[in-house]
Amino acid sequence: MTLTSSTDRAAAAALRHPEKRNRPDNPIQRKPDWIRVKAPTSAAYHETRKLMRELNLVTVCEEAACPNIGECWAKKHATMMIMGDTCTRACAFCNVATGTPKPLDAMEPANVGLSIATLGLEHVVITSVDRDDLSDGGAGHFASVVQAIRAAAPATTIEILTPDFKDKPGAVETIANSPPDVFNHNLETVPRLYPTIRPGARYFISLSLLRDIKRYLPRMFTKSGLMVGLGETREEVGQVMDDLRAADVDFLTIGQYLQPTPKHAPIDRFVTPDEFEGYAALARGKGFLLVSATPLTRSSYHAGDDFTKLRAARDAKLAATAAE
Ligand code: SF4
């Protein structure tokens, strides 16, 4: 056989080395079937997009080039990103622009509340860029947004996915005084990879934030997420699970890392669906109330359905404890 191109040579090399078959530099499986999604076409997708534009709202769905946007927006489920579209950090996995952000938009809390009431959402996820330039890291703005949603859409349950509030004393108390229904902060990866993947963050500060919020509000659900396929080992992921359980985190999400552009951290490998099932089983065994671990899992993917499951899981646990 004559190999005519680098693609052919890489394919042949992958056949000789089966352990490399699901690496992204292997053209045979560069886009595994389990990652592929359809392009968004539905009328509801376009309606959601129009509303976001009209109200001048930024979504992480678009900023992060999320592969689930067609499915989520068809259900009018958009995750809004507050405090602008420019982040003060430069994480190696994230597609959001880095720079000096604009001042906060005082109308944003009301606009977010209005959009949620218009969309008629049962459950909403609000996230933000990092705002290290603000004295409270944006905790007060998160609190204002939660209050505005409670006023405009009182039946909607609220999930916030926040930055780490590193070096921002008082941020936890500010959040706790206007509590959402779910508090989410993603650890993103294992501690060994923080210097390359999350250079502006510190693993134990993120972990402490989750622990401290739970101590303030023991009945509020807490949630965290990991990306896999960045070079982590199964043992390291298991250790992160143990750390999250020690911080009393209720819900763990695990999804495949996808490289947004060639400038971002490369994918080490595509984790197979079977391996995701293995992670889910491992996490359930460690005591999380709920686990979502699939290649396309993202923090906000199916968040409304998962909130219903979280409540049911807690009720079942309390009933079992009472019966003992
Ligand atoms: S998974 Fe989250 S970020 Fe992605 S499209 Fe759905 S709501 Fe948006």
Image (tube, rainbow, N blue to C red):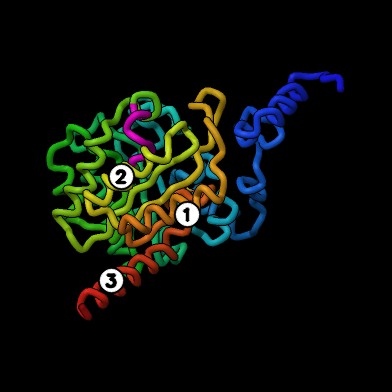
Q: Amino acid at mark 1?
A: Tyr
Residue at left offset 51%, top offset 42% = 256
Residue at left offset 42%, top offset 40% = 234
Q: Which mark is residue 301?
A: 1
Q: Which mark is residue 317?
A: 3
Q: Secondary structure at mark 2?
A: loop
Cα–Cα gap, marks 3 and 1:
24 Å
Of circles 3 and 2, which is in front? 3
Q: Badge 3 local density, few (<14 within 10 Å), some, or many (20+)?
A: few
Q: Is residue 56 visible?
A: no
Determine which residue is flagged by label 2.
Answer: 162
Q: Is residue 85 above or below residue 224?
A: above
Q: Quadrant of the C terminus?
A: bottom left
Quarter assignment of residue 8: top right
Q: Position of residue 37 (x, y in %)?
A: 64, 49
Figure label count? 3
Q: Which mark is residue 320?
A: none
Cα–Cα gap, marks 3 and 2:
27 Å
Q: Position of residue 175 (x, y in %)?
A: 20, 50
Which residues are the magenta region?
A: 187-194
Query: Viewed as shown, does residue 208 lie left or right of 78?
Result: left
